[in-house]
Image (cartoon, rainbow, N blue to C red):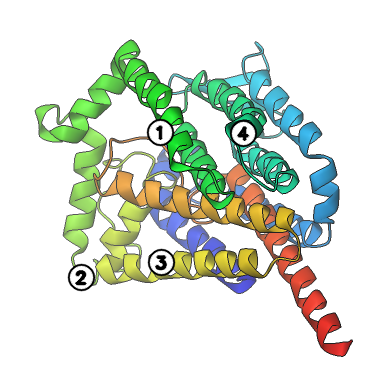
Amino acid sequence: MIACVVLLSVFGLVMQYSASSYSASMQFGDSFYYVKKQAIALVFALVALAGFSFISTELLRKLRLYILILSCVLLALVFVPGLGVENYGATRWINLGFTTFQPSDLAKFGLVIFIAGCLDKKSALTFKNMIPILLATAAVCLLIMLEPNMSVTMCVGIMVVIMLFAGGCKAKHFAIMAIPVVAGVVGLIFLEPYRLKRLMAFIDPWASPLGEGYQLIQSYYALGSGGLFGLGLFNSRQKYLFLTFSESDFILSIIGEELGWVGIVIVLTVFIFLSVCGIRIALKAKTRFDTYLAVGITSVIAVQTLLNVAVVSGSIPPTGLPLPFVSNGGTSLVCFMASIGILTNIDAKSQQSWLNHKMY
């Protein structure tokens, strides 16, 4: 599992260079601009992986409320003038002086830890027991939506549903929760004109080829021209300022263009393997908390991957969400690597428990 995430991260550096070399050279005068920043982030990410592989999950359980509060405080800090960084109409980053930090990447896993702790305490999951989970989810999602960042909100929402399902939530409870959620989503779409435009662009991107439909059309061109085996590494045409965010949210389109359908299948196979590893670790975990923690972490990785694939292929309306480990984004890489460290910690505990059982 560790070898897979390291391989994905190094592969991501190569693809980020291919996707961004021209735009980085034009904008910053350095074709390696994005790659250098991501390489530095990878070093910190590997340190985070190693560190969290030794941090006790019992400590995370005890600190779950403080971790949630810290996540919410950091999400709120993006709205502080002079501290929050606005880009493309969204305020999602905190300015640290030497770099920027995206709190929503941390908040996803902070919420996972809190929910795992709540599920650990309850032998039977009733609607009353779910109230703390629902309130925490509402607080995190509200702060993320205010940025605005609907893609991460969607990822968080699906992750919570998976964790509640794993915790034994009944179908009638899901039905009750679905009513306000669906109403809220519909309301948010019509309250913000850009969301409605994105929805219409998803239905017919060629109705606005230079507007809201532009990004999806360029993604289609990249994937379509790649064919079965691709145009060859570093031979993308869409990276020449046609496909925006090609090094981050739409890097899978560049992978498809250069390495073809076969390349995408190989990359997604690695993600499937990671998800299977996460599920196996959850099933073998020593404690209930570790089980739910592993389920939540695996859910975030799998759901974010699926949403990214769905966006670049036009299966859902366009929205910004990076491909884990591969897309450019230092905060995302560090947080995902730290989560892998937690999974290896849980696995090591279960292996040790199994060895002790065999010995005695």
What separation in Å lies between label 2 and label 1 (alpha carbons)?
A: 42 Å
Q: Is 71 placed left or right of 313 in the picture?
A: right
Q: Does residue 143 appear anywhere in the picture? A: yes
What separation in Å lies between label 4 and label 2 (alpha carbons)?
A: 47 Å
**Which of pointers 4 and 1 lies earlier in the amino acid sequence?**
4
Q: Tell me which residue sits at (45%, 66%) in the image.
A: 272
Marking on residue 228: 2
Q: Tell me which residue sits at (89%, 86%) in the image.
A: 360
Out of 322 and 211, give the one closest to the viewer.
322
**Which of pointers 2 and 3 lies earlier in the amino acid sequence?**
2
138 shown above or below 1: above
Location of residue 214 in the rendering, given as x and y in whole percent from the top left corner: 21, 34
Mark 2 burial class by Cα count in 10 Å: few <14, some 14-19, many 20+: some
Amino acid at dot 1: Ala
Judging by the rendered image, the residue that carries numbered circle 4 is 130
**Which of pointers 4 and 2 lies earlier in the amino acid sequence?**
4
What kind of element bears circle 2?
loop
**Which of pointers 1 and 3 lies earlier in the amino acid sequence?**
1
Location of residue 311 in the rendering, given as x and y in whole percent from the top left corner: 31, 44
